[in-house]
Amino acid sequence: MSTRTRRALALLSALLLPVVAAGCSGGGPAPARLGAGAAGPSSATPAPTGTAAPGAAEKGFTLVASGDVLPHTSVIKRAAADAGGDGWDFRPMFAGVKPVVSAADLALCHMETIYGEDGGPFSGYPAFVSPPEVADGLKDAGYDGCSTASNHTLDDGADGIRRTLDRFDKVGLGHAGSARTAAEAARTTMYRAGPAKVAHLAYTYDTNGYPMPDGQPWAVNEMKQDRIVADARAARKAGADVVLVSLHWGTEWETDPDETQLSLGKALTASQTDGRPDIDMILGTHAHVPQAYEKVNGTWIVYGMGDQVAGEMFNHSGARDLRGNYGSIGRFTFAPPAAPGQRWQVTKAEFIPQMMDLGPGRVVNLPAALAEDPGRGDYEEAREAVTEAVLGRGAAKDGLKPAR
C-alpha cells in the first residue's frame, strides 16, 4: 500500500472513530425514477411534484453513479459469446455490480458511445458504434438512466443519437446530454428518487471535432459555464429538489484533475440563487482513469469515475495501462432540508472500487470480490489504486469512505 493511501485511510479512520494510445483505444496500441419532464419512460411510476409517500421525507434517498461504458470490439465479442451466438447479451457483464446499482433509489450511468442498427455492423475505436443491447444490460443491472454527452456522441451523426435514445426509451432508461429534436433538447430530465424530484443535466467538452448535424445545433450539450448555470436554475424553477450535473471533461490518463476541471468545478459549485446552490453535485467522466472526489464550496465533485466497461486500454505512450479498466462507483445519501427552500444535504458519501476483469469480461465489485477471495493480487492492486486516486484530494476529511 502506498504512503498516500496509508495517510488517507489513517485520516479516514481517525475521523470515523469518534462517532489510455488515445484513451478510447482498445485491442492494440494506437495513437428513481423517471418523473415528469424526462426524456423517456421508466419502470417506476412518477410521483406528482411536491408529493411523497408517508414517512418518505424522513428517509431521503440514495444515489449511485458510475463511469464510462465504452464497448471496444473485444467487449462486443464477449457479449456475443455470452449470448450463445444469438445476438449480444451484456447482462452478465454488469451482474457483479447489480446488487449495488439496483439497491439505490436513483442509479445513473454514463453511456459514452452510440448504438448501431439492430444486428450491426458494430465497431470499436476510433468511431464507436455499439450494439443496442448494451441498454438492456444497463437496465437489467438497475440503472434508471445515463448521461449521453461525450466526445463520441457524434461518431455516427444524428442517426447514432436517434438509435441510442430510441433504445433507451424502449427499455425504460432516462437520458440527458443529447437529443433527437429541439423540443427534447429543451426539456429537463427529471427523476423521482424517494420523496425528491431530481434533475439530471449532462455536457461534454468536445465531440472529437465532429460538427453538430446540419440544422441541429442542440444535438449534444456543450460544456459552457453560463449554459450549465442557466440550465440548473431552470431545472430548479421547474421543481427540482436536487440538481445533478454530469460533465465529460478532464485530460485522458491523468489521475489529477486538470485546470479546467478545478476552475469550472469551483465556479459551478459557487453559483447560487437566493443563497441556495444552483448545483448539488458534479459527476465527472472521460479521463479513463479513476480521479478524486472532493467537496468544493460545500458541494461534492467527482472529477472522474474512470471506465466501468472497456477493452484492453493503452495510454498515450502506447503502453498497456491497467488503470483504463479501473473505476469507482459513487454512492451518496441525500437527506431532506431542515426548512423549505434550503438544499438537500449529502449525509453519507461512499465509493466502491470496481474493475473490468478482461478475462471473463465482467465488471467486478472489488471489495465484494476480495471478501470472497482475499488472495487475488490483481484485485487488491486495483482496489488500492482506485482508493488512492479517489482520496487523493483529501475527501476523507469530509467523510468520504470506502464501501462495498
Image (cartoon, rainbow, N blue to C red):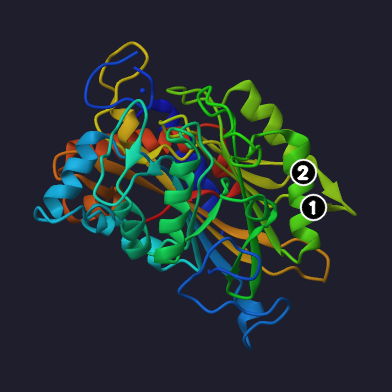
- Tags 1 and 2 touching, CB below 8 Å: yes
For the C terminus, the quadrant is bottom left
Is residue 178 positioned above or below 394 on the image? below
The tally of labels here is 2
In depth, the one of 391 and 132 nearer the eye is 132
Mark 2 Cα within 10 Å, few/some/many (few <14, many 20+)? some
In depth, the one of 285 and 290 nearer the eye is 285
Q: In which quarter of the image is residue 216?
A: top right
Mark 1 residue element:
helix
Mark 2 residue element:
helix
- Residue denoted by label 1: 233
The location of residue 352, given as percent across then percent down, is 40, 50
- Residue denoted by label 2: 229
Furthest-left residue in view?
Answer: 84
**In the image: residue 102, left or right of residue 137:** right
Is residue 49 positioned above or below 83 on the image? below
